[in-house]
Amino acid sequence: MKRKIQYILALVVLIGTTAQAQQPKGKYATFALTHATIQTVTKGVIQDGTVILSQGKITAVGTNVSIPSGAEVVDCKGKWIYPGLIDSGTTLGLVEVGSDARTQDFNEVGDVIPQMKALTAVNPNSALIPVTRISGVTTVIAAPEGDLVPGTAALINLYGYTPDQMYGGFEGVVLNFPNTGRKGFFDRRTDEDIKKAAEKAMTRINSVWEMAVQYHKLDSATKSKGVGYYPEMEALLPVVRGERALMIEANASKDIEAALKWVKDHKVKKVILTGVAEGWRVADEIAKANIPVVAGPVQELPTRDYDRYDKPYANPGLLKKAGVKVALRTAQASNVRNLPYHAAFAAAYGLGKEQALRAVTIVPAEIFGVSDKLGSIEVGKNATLLVSDGDPFETKTTILQVYIDGWQVPMVSRQTLLYDEFLHRDPGVTKN
């Protein structure tokens, strides 16, 4: 029986390996994308323009561009070129099947575990990644979930064989700020229990932060020679020093206000607010604190029964109107591909088309400190962009080609392969 099981496992591995080998490869070369309408995001729209991609970078953009010798010319007449879209908060790469805990790697044991790095858990071979990137989403924040400090999130580009190849140049420690409200209709705790739980969590956070500050002082005084092995504090050290962002998840307006006060009282230097479902209620306070926001998901229900149905759609626009720098996220894994439509809803409900596009391109690049590499079509930036037959926020638009760091990405996924397989069945199906 044991030998039979081993045989079956070997066969499964062989089939999997064969299927993987049948996947088309990306192509790395010098490309000249000609005659396109180029949405640069930062420098307007260029009609009948050319973009040169070489050695993984954008080396030329404009209407009077010389095509390098040996470049592969791609005629993009009638097509649009946009920067690759950035989802600023997902679990993509950290989960494969939501209903199977064995395929989930975004929630570790422990209430304060900043040393747990999402980057090390990213699965480059996730079937969800090709599904996502052929929709034009080229870069995401892979973020852990869990208790108070569930780990460190990472920016990843959606092409590569290893997490290190995919690393996009940003990491931030995630802090789930204590929730003073109910966690949903299933939360049967009394008001007193909820209050006690929030106070206990706040005490824990304050204690951890104070330890991190003392650890920083000790580490600085001894030039890192007087401290023992303490991975949690090592992970928080760059946050205390302002070298790494603290990504604070807070959604209820009261919790957002408390988080803003906590940040001010504890002099946290680099902060990004995430979620902020009720950010519109306290938009002026967020703007006054000058803290950028990752809002979303946009396609969501209101947090309170008596709120208008469209408040989640309008939230990014209201935040922007108050003066807050806003990026967008889906907070999903299997449906990160829908990021363009989250942006479209935000655009239609007050953010506007131009700002919505910026919220999934240059704004997140600025928030994560990688605007010299991503977020717009400019010379010197990474060759990460998409070619489409129209506005990517429109559902009728087809993404024709995606380039990530200069790689021409195969425009196939498990979904397209299944579509092709069953569109032309051989043998065909006959009715009995």
Image (cartoon, rainbow, N blue to C red):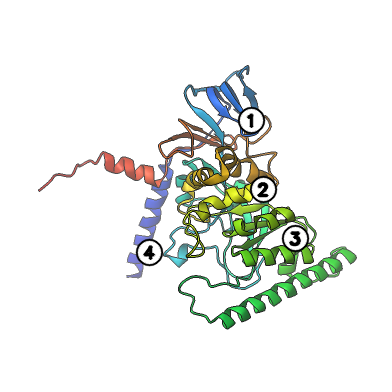
How far apart, in angstroms, are the residues tagged by discs 1 and 4? 49 Å
Secondary structure of residue under mark 1: strand
Q: Are marks 1 and 3 in contact (CB under 8 Å)?
A: no
Q: Are marks 2 and 3 in contact (CB under 8 Å)?
A: no
How far apart, in angstroms, are the residues tagged by discs 2 and 4? 55 Å
Q: x, y percentage for residue 140?
A: 57, 49
Q: Nearer the viewer, mark 2 or mark 4?
A: 2
Q: Are marks 2 and 1 in contact (CB under 8 Å)?
A: no
311 displayed left or right of 256: left
Residue indicated by mark 1: 58
Q: Are marks 1 and 4 in contact (CB under 8 Å)?
A: no
Q: Nearer the viewer, mark 2 or mark 3?
A: 2
Residue indicated by mark 3: 239
How far apart, in angstroms, are the residues tagged by discs 3 and 4? 48 Å
Disc 1: CA contacts within 10 A as few (<14), some (14-19) or many (>=20)? many
Q: Earlier in the sequence, mark 2 or mark 1?
A: 1
Q: Amino acid at mark 2?
A: Lys
Disc 2: CA contacts within 10 A as few (<14), some (14-19) or many (>=20)? many
Q: Earlier in the sequence, mark 2 or mark 3?
A: 3
Is residue 275 visible to the viewer in this orientation of the structure?
no
Q: Which mark is residue 6?
A: 4
Residue indicated by mark 2: 325
Q: Quadrant of the N terminus?
A: bottom left
Q: Earlier in the sequence, mark 1 or mark 4?
A: 4
Q: Earlier in the sequence, mark 3 or mark 4?
A: 4
Q: Earlier in the sequence, mark 2 or mark 4?
A: 4
